[in-house]
Every structure is written in structure tokens, then in C-alpha cells.
Image (cartoon, grey):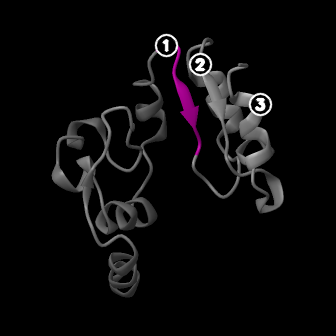
Amino acid sequence: AVLFRKNLQGVVSIEKPRSSKWICTSAPSRDWDLKDVTHCSGEYFVRNMLHQVWFYEAVRHIPNRALVVEVSPRTIFQGILKQSVPEDCLHFTPILRKGDLNPLLSPEASTLLQPEM
């Protein structure tokens, strides 16, 4: 854990406040006001790797009509999310099976999202 923390601090060297829309799964909701939870930092990601995940508790805080982005090397929570979030939420996973990037994130696909002129 010490070596991981040291190496990660070199990658995430500047700690920044996270958006209030970012729901934390690495701490129970009673701790969401603590600095190491409210800020995106190396310590935040170390916590994610080393501590239990509070997934069910976090999912209960997802509001209606939310865009839910699963940031994960695999779509392991896709089924759980579909059953747990409000029906009017949209679930999106940037990474697909075999580590391929979702085609919706390609530069070519971004033209599909542009409004017609």
C-alpha cells in the first residue's frame, strides 16, 4: 500500500475538489464530508483500491434522470445498476469487454452528437 500510494501521488499530484454530482462508493455516506473523500487525489484512489466498496449505499443517492457512468475496467456492475437506479437514468460504461473503448467515445462518434446546422 505504501509503494502504491507513493507512485500514485506522482500521477495525481494536485488534489482537486470533486463535483457534488460524483457519488463516492469508497466511503459510507456519513464520511462524504471528509477531505480525503471530497477531493480527487492520490489518497482518494488508494482508498478505492484498499477499502471495501459501499456500492449499495451510494446507488441509493443517485437522483432521477441521472447519467450514471461506470468507471471500471469491466462492466461488472452493469446488471446491478440496471436493477438499482431509477428507471429514467441512463447507464454508460466507457470500457467494454476485452478492454476495448466504447465506440461512442471515438472521435468519429462525437460527430453524431453534434446538433445539425
Quadrant in the picture for the C terminus:
top right
Q: Residue 29: x percent and y percent?
A: 28, 36
Q: Nearer the viewer, mark 3 or mark 1?
A: 3
CB atoms of marks 2 and 3 within 8 Å: no
Near mark 3 (Cα within 10 A), the count class, few <14, some 14-19 or many ≥20, is few
Image height of 10 relative to 23, above or below: below
Residue sitting farthest toward the front = 117
Q: Residue 85: x percent and y percent?
A: 56, 21
In terms of secondary structure, where does tag 2 sit? loop
Q: Residue at x 33, y 84 (%)?
A: 6
Residue 68 magenta: yes
Q: Residue at x 62, y 12 (%)?
A: 87
Q: Which residue is mark 1?
A: 64
Along the viewing direction, whichever of 14 and 66 lies nearer the viewer: 14
Please tell me in which quadrant of the rendered image residue 50 appears. bottom left
Give the residue type that dot 2 points to: Cys
In terms of secondary structure, where does tag 3 sit? helix
CB atoms of marks 1 and 2 within 8 Å: yes
Question: Where does the magenta region start and end?
Answer: 64-70
Q: Residue 11: x percent and y percent?
A: 40, 75
Number of the label disc, if any, that sits on residue 112: 3
Report the side of 13 relative to 79 (left or right). left
Give the residue type that dot 1 points to: Asn
Q: Which residue is mark 2?
A: 89
Near mark 2 (Cα within 10 A), the count class, few <14, some 14-19 or many ≥20, is some
Q: Residue 26: x percent and y percent?
A: 38, 50
Point out the tag, 3 or 1, that comes first from the N-terminus.
1
